């Protein structure tokens, strides 16, 4: 991999690790929800869809608007070749219900032969706090996109988590890359108290489950998360965005396809010459999963168009390279084909 491409990928990972310092940027939802019909025509939403939309908006806002603190067990499962890998740990989370949050790994539960590696994991978790809170777990990130891309199936059963009554739902992506979740939603608050992430074949990829929960707790001693990267909103007007960046932003397609633009930002980072360099970061969502597209303007080493697909890390895929003389990277918990489609839509 060329050095500029390595630098871009490192920047991308650092930007994602340090993101998030306040309220999640959530696009306003239209009051006139529509459903995709046949070959892309639209019609007013069915009453059942409107009821789902109301429930999904509650699900979307709960973790941001419900003041709470708790301890969660987290499991992550993936494969390297034929070898199954697992990481499990406990973390403490807190939200003041007004946008501030804190998240801290308490202990690693999976076996780790190297004590130094376990200590490094706790530090890495702290460095990735913004990404973890905003993007790691199941969440409804865009209601309209969710209704177009996912099936929400109530299982009709009452389950109890921490002595609290919860409704269970099965969530499955209905287009493209198969993704499914089983979630337990607290009836009183709308918080997701348990979420299982699985492959289409039912293989467990991840589990997040609350082991303790306090509502409206005393949060006076909490050290709230602060972002570690310098970011600012990217103007939607192409000319204004070009003035911010110093180059023309390549905007991913946002025309009602699978992915919708969630937020666009400018990242300022050290450049190779010791000065500052600006990058455009676009965050897209299909309603649940997120996809990131970063590009940084001119690639002085570019001789030809190059797109490289990295080996997957669990459900995460990455494509990076240089196109038309500009560096880019695109990554997400989606299929490689979907990454390449998003890249192609920027050309």
Image (spheres, rainbow, N blue to C red):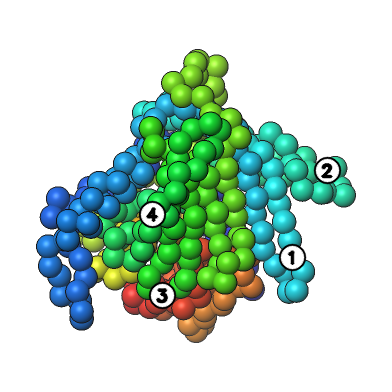
Residue located beneath label 1 in the image: 84
* Sequence-wise first label, 4 or 2: 2
Determine the CA span between mark 4 and mark 2: 44 Å
Tell me what residue is drawn at x 38 percent, y 54 percent: 154
Determine the CA span between mark 4 and mark 1: 31 Å
Mark 2 burial class by Cα count in 10 Å: few <14, some 14-19, many 20+: few
Image quarter of residue 291: bottom left
Whether the residues at callouts 2 and 3 have beta carbons within 8 Å, the answer is no
Residue located beneath label 2 in the image: 116
Tell me what residue is drawn at x 20 percent, y 79 percent: 38
| Percent coordinates x, y for residue 194 in the rendering | 53, 45
Residue located beneath label 4 in the image: 154
Work out which quarter of the rendered image holds the C terminus and state it. Answer: bottom left
Name the secondary structure under disc 3.
Answer: loop
Say whether residue 192 is left or right of residue 23: right
Residue located beneath label 3 in the image: 176
Determine the CA span between mark 2 and mark 3: 41 Å
Q: Is residue 280 visible?
A: no
Q: Nearer the viewer, mark 4 or mark 1?
A: 4
Tell me what residue is drawn at x 51 percent, y 24 percent: 214
Count numbered badges in the picture: 4
* Sequence-wise first label, 4 or 1: 1
Work out which quarter of the rendered image holds the N terminus and state it. Answer: bottom right
Q: Nearer the viewer, mark 2 or mark 3?
A: 3
Determine the CA span between mark 2 and mark 1: 22 Å
């Amino acid at each position: 991999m060329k050095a500029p491409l390595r630098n871009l990928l490192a920047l991308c990972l650092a930007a994602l690790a340090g993101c998030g310092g306040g309220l999640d940027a959530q696009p306003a939802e239209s009051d006139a929800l529509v459903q995709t019909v046949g070959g892309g025509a639209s019609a007013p939403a069915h009453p059942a869809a409107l009821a789902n939309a109301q429930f999904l908006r509650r699900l979307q806002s709960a973790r941001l608007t419900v003041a709470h603190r708790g301890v969660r067990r987290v499991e992550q499962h993936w494969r390297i070749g034929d070898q199954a890998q697992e990481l499990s740990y406990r973390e403490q989370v807190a939200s003041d219900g007004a946008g501030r949050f804190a998240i801290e790994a308490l202990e690693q539960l999976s076996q780790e032969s190297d004590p130094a590696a376990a200590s490094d994991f706790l530090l890495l978790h702290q460095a990735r706090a913004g990404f973890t809170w905003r993007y790691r777990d199941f969440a409804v990130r865009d209601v309209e996109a969710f209704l177009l891309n996912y099936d929400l199936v109530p299982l009709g059963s009452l389950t109890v988590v921490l002595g609290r009554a919860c409704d269970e739902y099965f969530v499955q992506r209905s287009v493209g890359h198969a993704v499914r979740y089983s979630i337990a939603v607290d009836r009183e608050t709308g918080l997701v108290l348990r979420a299982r992430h699985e492959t289409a074949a039912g293989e467990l990829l991840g589990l997040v489950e609350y082991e303790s929960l306090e509502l409206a707790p005393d949060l006076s001693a909490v050290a709230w998360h602060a972002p570690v990267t310098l970011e600012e909103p990217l103007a939607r007007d192409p000319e204004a965005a070009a003035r911010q960046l110093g180059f023309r932003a390549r905007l991913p397609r946002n025309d009602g396809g699978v992915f919708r633009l969630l937020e666009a930002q400018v990242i300022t980072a050290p450049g190779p010459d010791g000065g500052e360099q600006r990058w455009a970061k676009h965050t897209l969502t299909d309603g649940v999963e997120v996809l990131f597209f970063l590009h940084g303007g001119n690639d002085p080493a570019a001789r030809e168009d190059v797109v490289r697909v990295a080996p997957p890390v669990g459900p995460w895929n990455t494509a990076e390279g240089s196109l038309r003389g500009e560096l880019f990277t695109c990554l997400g918990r989606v299929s490689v084909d979907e990454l390449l489609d998003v890249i192609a839509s920027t050309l």
